[in-house]
Image (cartoon, rainbow, N blue to C red):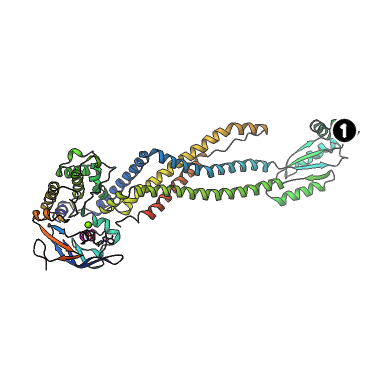
Amino acid sequence: MKQVNRKKNTRPKKTFKSELKRRFDMWLLQHAQAFIFSLGQYIKYPVSNILTTAVIGISLALPASFYLLLDNVRYVSSSWDGSVQITLFLQTNVDEARAAEFANILSDSNNINETVLIKRADALAEYQKLSGFAEALNTLDENPLPNVVLVKPNLDSSNEAETETLIKELEAMPEVDSAQYDSRWLKRLLYLLDIVNRLIVILSTLLAIAVLLIIGNTIRLSIHNRRSEIEITKLFGGTDSFIQRPFLYSGLWYGVFGGIIAWLLITISMQMLHGPVKQLANLYASDFQLIGLGFGNSVILLACGIALGLLGSWIAVKRHLRSIEPV
Amino acid sequence: MIRFTNVHMNYPGGNEALRNINLHIEQGAMVYITGRSGAGKSTLLRLIALIDRHTRGQIIINGQNLERVRNRRIPIFRRHIGFMFQDHRLLNDRTVFDNVALPLVIAGYRHQEIRKRVQAALDKVSLLQKVNSYPMALSGGEQQRVGVARAVVHRPAILLADEPTGNLDPALSLDTMKLFEQFNQVGVTVLIASHDLDMIRRMSKRIITLKAGRVLPLGGTPTES
Ligand SMILES: Nc1ncnc2c1ncn2[C@@H]1O[C@H](COP(=O)(O)OP(=O)(O)O)[C@@H](O)[C@H]1O
Ligand SMILES: [Mg+2]
C-alpha cells in the first residue's frame, strides 16, 4: 500500500463540493465516451447495422403511416359530417313560386343555416339528361317530380335528438310531403373508423414488440461478441453501469436512426401521394390536401424510436450481462 | 496486507478447492504460489479478487474483511488490484494503447492523465514504439509485456499473476519476473501463481506450496504460524 498511501498524502484535502464536481465531470466524461464509442461501433459495422436499422425504420413507419391515413380519413369524413343536409320533398300541388317563398321562410329559421331550392322543371331536365329516359319522360304530359328543398341545419350534427326534432317539425309543415335524412352511412363509417383505429393499436403494439425483439437480439449478439472485453472490464473494476452504458447508447442509436428512416419513408410516400390525391379532390371540387406528419408527430415518432431502442437494449443488458463471469 | 484465516472454498458441486488455508502476506512482499495443476492456485487468487467468494473462514485484504464487501462495492474494491493471465487476454480489436488504458478508462481518468500513465507503463516494459499496434501484430513475449503494463498502469496495491509465464521460453519468463520484481520494489505486493519451479527457485522469494487445497509446511521460507 506504499503507493496508495503516498498518493493520498500528496492529495490536497478536498471539499465536498469539489468532490461532487469531480464526480460529475467523471460521469459526464464516461457518458461522452460511451456515446462516441457506441456511434463508432455503429459506423464500424455499416452493413449489418443499416439492415437492422432499416427493419426498425419500416416497423415504425407502418403503424405511423396507418395512423396518418386514419387522420386523413377522419378529416375528410368530418367535413362530410358538417355538410349533412335534410332533403324536403314538397307536395306536388305546391308550385314553384310558393316553393321559393317557402324555402326563403325556412332559411330565416334559427336552426337552419341555408336552403337551396331545386325547381321541379330543373330537376326533370337534369334527370332527363342523366338517366337516358328522355323519350319515356317526354311521353308524360305532366312533370312527375316535386319541388325539392335542401336544408342545411344549423345544429351540431352529432346531436341526434335535435336533428330528429327538426325533421319532425319540417315534416309536419303542410307544404312538405316527406323529409329525408340519412345519417346511417356516416355512423357506419365512424364505427368502421373506430374498428380500424383499434386494429392499428393492435398492429402498433405487435410491431413495437417486434422492434424490441430486434433491438434486444442485436444487443444480445453484440454483448456476446464482446464477452471477453466485458470480462476484462469487470476484472479491472468496471461497474455494471459502466459496462452497460455503451450497449444502452447503441440501443439509442438504433432508435434514433430507425426513427429517422421511418420519417423519411413516410415523408417520401406522402410526397408521392400528394399529386394524385389533389387531382382526386379536384374532381369532388374539394381543396383537400393530405395531412402530413407535421412537427409534433415527427417528434413523437422519433421519441417512440428512442424509447423502444433504450427499452430493448435495457432488457437485453439486464438479461445477458449478469450471466458473464466474474460477477 | 493479505490474511487468510481458516479459509475453505467449496465450488458448487462439492468440489473442495481449498481447505483450511492460513496465510499472511505482508504489504510489499513478493510471493510465489506453487503446486500441481488443480492444487488450488488459481482459486486462491480468485478469492483475493472476489471473483469467487470463499465458503468458510476469514479473508482480510488491505484491512477489509471480504465478507463485508457487498457485491455493489466489488468493482471499487478491484480497482486496487492488477491482473495478469497466462493467455494475457488482450482485446484484439484494440490497439496496445487502448488495451493498456482500459483500467484507467474504467476508473474515469482524464485523457491527458491516461496518456501520461500509459506511456510510462509501456516505457517500463519497453514497448513504447508499439503503442499503436494491434496485439495480433506482436510476438508472444511482447503481448505478455502489454499484459504486464495493463496490470500495473493504474498503480494497484496488489498484483495478481496467474501462470504469467506459462507460454514463454525460460529467457522471456525470467524477463517478466524481473519486471515484477521492479514493481515490487516500488511497493506493489505481488502474488504469482506458477508451477515453473526452476524459475521460482532462481528468484529466491517466499514460496507457498499448495497440494490438494492445503498449504504445505515446506515452502521456500519458514511457514507462518
Ligand atoms: N469454476 C469451478 N467450478 C468447480 N470447480 C472448480 C472451478 N474452478 C476450479 N475448480 C476445481 O478446484 C480445484 C482447484 O482448481 P484451480 O484453483 O484452478 O487449480 P490450479 O490453478 O492450481 O490448477 C480443481 O479441482 C478444480 O477442478
Ligand atoms: Mg490455475
Residue A135 in view here: yes
Q: Is residue A117 left or right of residue A265?
A: right
Of all chains, the one bearing label 1 is A
Give how far across and how far down residue A59 sits, in percent. Answer: 50, 44
Q: Residue furthest right?
A: A141
Give how far across and how far down residue A37 sits, in percent. Answer: 33, 43
> Ligand 1, what quadrant?
bottom left
Dividing the image into 4 quarters, which one contains the N terminus of chain A? bottom left
* Vertical comparison of B98 with B216: above or below: above
> SS of the residue at dot 1?
helix
Q: Residue at x 23, y 49 (%)?
A: B88
Q: Is residue A143 left or right of residue B202?
A: right
- The answer to whether residue B125 is magenta is no
Give how far across and how far down residue B73 sits, in percent. Answer: 27, 59
Give how far across and how far down residue B207 sits, in percent. Answer: 12, 60
Q: Residue at x 78, y 49 (%)?
A: A168
Residue A156 in view here: no
Say which amino acid is labelled 1. Ala
As rendered, which of A90 and A222 lies closer to the eye? Answer: A222
As rendered, which of A322 and A304 lies closer to the eye? Answer: A322
Dividing the image into 4 quarters, which one contains the C terminus of chain A? bottom left
As rendered, which of A305 and A282 lies closer to the eye? Answer: A305
Q: Residue at x 59, y 48 (%)?
A: A197
Identify residue for label 1: A136
Q: Which residues are magenta?
A: B36-54
Q: Is residue B183 left or right of residue A121?
A: left
- Identify the image quadrant of residue B9: bottom left
- The answer to whether residue B53 is magenta is yes
- Identify the image quadrant of residue B189: bottom left
Q: Is residue A173 left or right of residue B150?
A: right
- Queried on whether the Cβ of the residue with tag 1 lies below 8 angstroms from ligand 1, the answer reads no
* Vertical comparison of A90 with A165: above or below: above
